[in-house]
Image (cartoon, coloured by chain):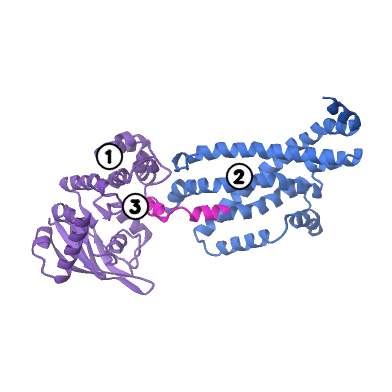
Chain colours: A blue, B purple
Amino acid sequence: MQWITELYEQNKRVIDVAIQSFPKILIPGLKVTIPLTVLSFSFAMIIAVAVAMIQYSRVPVLRQLCRFYIWVIRGTPLLVQLYLVFFGLPSVGIVLDGFTAAVIVFSINEGAYCAETMRSALEAVPVGQIEAGYCVGMNYFQIMRRIVLPQAFRTAFPPLSNSLIGMVKDTSLAANITVVEMFMATQRIARANYVTLALYIEVALIYLLFSTVLTFIQRRGEKRLSAYAALRKA
Amino acid sequence: MADLILNAQGIKKSFGGVEVLRGVDLSVYRGDVVAVLGSSGSGKTTLLRCLNFLERADSGTLSFDGESFELAGISKKQIAAIRAKTAFVFQNYNLFANKTALKNVTEGLIVARKTPKKEAEERGMELLSRVGLADKRDQYPHELSGGQQQRVAIARALAADPDIIYFDEPTSALDPELIGEVLSVIRSLAEEGRTMLVVTHEMSFAENVSNRVVFMEDGRILEEAPSSVFFREVKSERIRSFLNMIKKEEEKK
């Protein structure tokens, strides 16, 4: 036990800063990082389902527009997209606050990736499911809503959870456009106190905590969704 | 026998330049159980799928329950109207994977026909009992054996009380010991006078249950005869060799 006391004595200032700043990092996490993630991911899912359905159903013209959207968004860096919307758009008269700009960019960006996840999940539903739907008299929309989408969602759930966990961490990029989220808050404390290593480890651990909670929720969700799927016995 | 339910004339269908149906004429009367035989690639399944518009025929006419349609130009509405009077049983069952056995049976009633839920469920349970699976109402398809799945599929086909049921090789995907349970359900439907068009490789079924046999070869109907005549007095060399081949394969099992 001696060495712990010694270690504390030697690093007293750093450790005190780290402990005192815990709520100062966590609170922006709860108040900004999580709402930013939840809002952006919800919009991203709406975009993803719509874009995937348009492609899956081979809607002319719109389908090409969707391909174009995915091509552009996946082909440019997220950070550039953030700068473009927040610092670029004001020059054409569109001024957005940092949080709004971040929600817009994260939604559109994640929507493109999740659209591809959803599309592949839709394509994986056997065509016989659709034929059976027609044969019992259902129309295309009824089949999509009641048969194809629920099955596709089951397939897409693990990779979508992946995207969500990825997004929690990507929100740290919003620090670049004045959003005081968890990482920005950490940077400020670090600069004010000249403590870096301890604080950046601390914020990393909080991100890890958030991701762990999400991973746990993912597991529960998968279990619930797999009522009808033959699962490999653990 | 006089009541014509389905009359197809000159059905043609090509896939990428390969002519699969080369002008098929077929009549089905109310109460008929027609077995469609033929080697694989002869167009049996495609014919069935064209009759229910799972494939769109290139040309031909279909008169169904007194109404005539050009197959090439038929509208979605007309297709829906015909499908409302038909049912289809698939080779690999195609039960809705995300629905329980009971919901598979009631789904079409509730969603497509707007039958009140309670009424649909009563009908569903009645049909599941009919195929001997009332106790499996809450099982998902993957929890059922192939034979059980196919029986649920038959219950689903019966739900809307169709004028004709199409069976596309209903026992071909089944283990030999499960074939009997499905065939006996189909036989009981024949006994109650259901109109059925059955693509099959089960010769004993064709001989004992169906009243008519249609033999297809190279996208055409080569022979059409009452089943008693077909199995006892076939003249064509081609059909005789087909029957012998099937017989040999059955003996192997």
The amino acid on which the numbered mark 3 sits, given as a three-letter code, is Asn
Give the residue number, with chain letter if any, for mark 1.
B127
The reply to whether dot 2 and dot 3 touch (C-beta < 8 Å) is no
Q: In which quadrant is the N terminus of chain A drawn? A: top right
> Where on the picture, by quarter, is residue B249?
bottom left
Given this view, does label 3 or label 1 mark the residue nearer the observer? Answer: 3
- Asked if residue A124 is among those painted magenta in the image, a careful observer would answer yes
B160 vs A103, left or right, is left
- Which chain's residue wears label 3? B
Q: Secondary structure at mark 2?
A: helix
Q: Observer-nearest residue: B62 or A192?
A: A192
The chain letter under disc 2 is: A
Measuring 10% from the left and 69% from the top, which residue is drawn there? B235
Please say if B45 is above or below A37.
below
Residue at the image position 86 percent from the left and 32 percent from the top: A15
Highlighted magenta segment, given as a residue range: A117-139
Residue holding disc 2: A161
Q: Dot 3 corresponds to which residue?
A: B92
Q: Does the stretch in magenta take in B80?
A: no
